[in-house]
Image (cartoon, grey):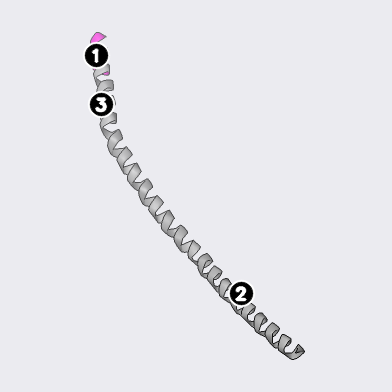
Amino acid sequence: MARRKVEVLEWEIRQLKSDCVEKILDFKKLFSAIPEKIDEKITIMEEMIRKMLEFQTKMASPEAREATKFFMTAKKVEDLEE
């Protein structure tokens, strides 16, 4: 009877060890994928920032031109008044 209990306990320990090894491997897979996912996210964010800067540059250009025209017109008026 005692021998049977030992065999059952040994089987349970082997099963538990197998389950732990499987869980550890699953965690290793998950953790090894994290840097790749972070790199992907950074690449996406860099692209978004680049596009936003391009858009801002395009939008700022007409406004800058208008401001320059306004400044140049005001300067000409000042020159005429002198």
* Cβ–Cβ under 8 Å for marks 2 and 1: no
Residue at coordinates 72% horizontally, 85% vertically from top-left?
5
The residue segment tinted magenta is: 75-81
Residue at coordinates 28% horizontally, 29% vertically from top-left?
63
* Cβ–Cβ under 8 Å for marks 3 and 1: no
- The residue at which mark 3 appears reads as 66
Q: Earlier in the sequence, mark 2 or mark 3?
A: 2
Say above or below: 36 vs 81: below
| Disc 1 residue crowd, few under 14, some 14–19, many 20+, Cα 10 Å | few
Residue at coordinates 41% horizontally, 58% vertically from top-left?
40
Q: What separation in Å lies between label 2 and label 3 (alpha carbons)? A: 69 Å
Q: What kind of residue is marked 3?
A: Glu
Q: Position of residue 55 (x, y in %)?
A: 30, 41
Q: What kind of residue is marked 2?
A: Cys
Q: What separation in Å lies between label 3 and label 1 (alpha carbons)? A: 16 Å
Which of the 4 image quarters holds residue 78?
Answer: top left
Mark nearer the viewer, 3 or 1 = 3
For residue 77, the mark is 1
Q: Position of residue 37 (x, y in %)?
A: 45, 60
- The residue at which mark 2 appears reads as 20
Left or right side of 16 for 5: right
The quarter in which the N terminus is drawn is bottom right
Q: Secondary structure at mark 3?
A: helix
Q: What separation in Å lies between label 2 and label 1 (alpha carbons)? A: 84 Å
Asked if residue 66 is among those painted magenta in the image, a careful observer would answer no
Q: Secondary structure at mark 2?
A: helix
